Amino acid sequence: MSDQLPRILSAITVVLACVLMAGVIARKSLFYRGLLQDTAHRELPLDGARGLLALGVLAHHCDFAHQWLKTRQWESEFKLV
């Protein structure tokens, strides 16, 4: 398990960096600020679930890309037991 800890920490770091960057863009960009203020026709819990799923896909792809750079095989070391 200890050999997987750096991969888990790097995935968490990438996800947190993406969340931080999205927050900065949402606050500074007039275009996105306008879109975020118009929430009358949106299902906010569904948007939150979509965001969490997108972050999961990002972490999954980062894991596969890390493995590709390391071994040149498009697979993951994590196995479901």
Image: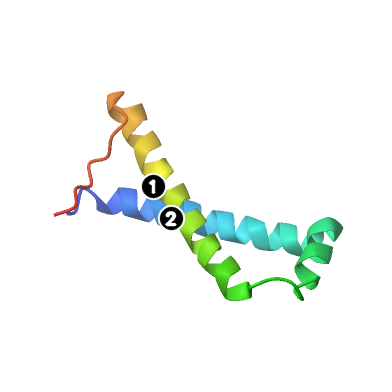
User: In the image, is residue 29 above or below residue 74?
Assistant: below
Which residue corresponds to the image point at 55% horizontal and 55% vertical from the top-left?
Answer: 17
* Nearer to the camera, 41 or 35: 41
Q: Secondary structure at mark 2?
A: helix
Residue 52 position (above or below residue 45): above
Q: Position of residue 54 (x, y in %)?
A: 51, 54
Alpha carbon of mark 1 to alpha carbon of mark 2: how far? 6 Å
Residue type highlighted by circle 2: Gly
Classify 10 Å Cα crowding around label 1: few (below 14), some (14-19), many (20 and above): some
Rendered location of residue 20, percent (x, y): 61, 60
For badge 1, the amino acid type reads His
Marks 1 & 2, CB-CB < 8 Å contact: yes
Which residue shows up at 64% across the image and 56% down it? 21
Q: Rate crowding at label 2 as few (under 14), some (14 to 19) or many (20 or more) other CA atoms within 10 Å.
A: some
Closer to us: 48 or 5: 48
Residue sitting farthest toward the top = 72
Q: Residue furthest front?
A: 41
Q: Which mark is residue 56?
A: 2
Residue assigned mark 1:
60
Using the image as rendered, state which of residue 17 and residue 80 is in the foreground.
80
Q: Image check: 2 left or right of 35?
A: left
- Residue extending furthest toward the left: 81
Q: Quadrant of residue 28?
A: bottom right
Up-down: is 21 above or below 70? below
Residue positioned 56% across, 69% down in the render: 46
> Which numbered dot is residue 42?
none
Q: Position of residue 24 (x, y in %)?
A: 71, 60
Who's the residue at 57% across and 74% down the image? 45
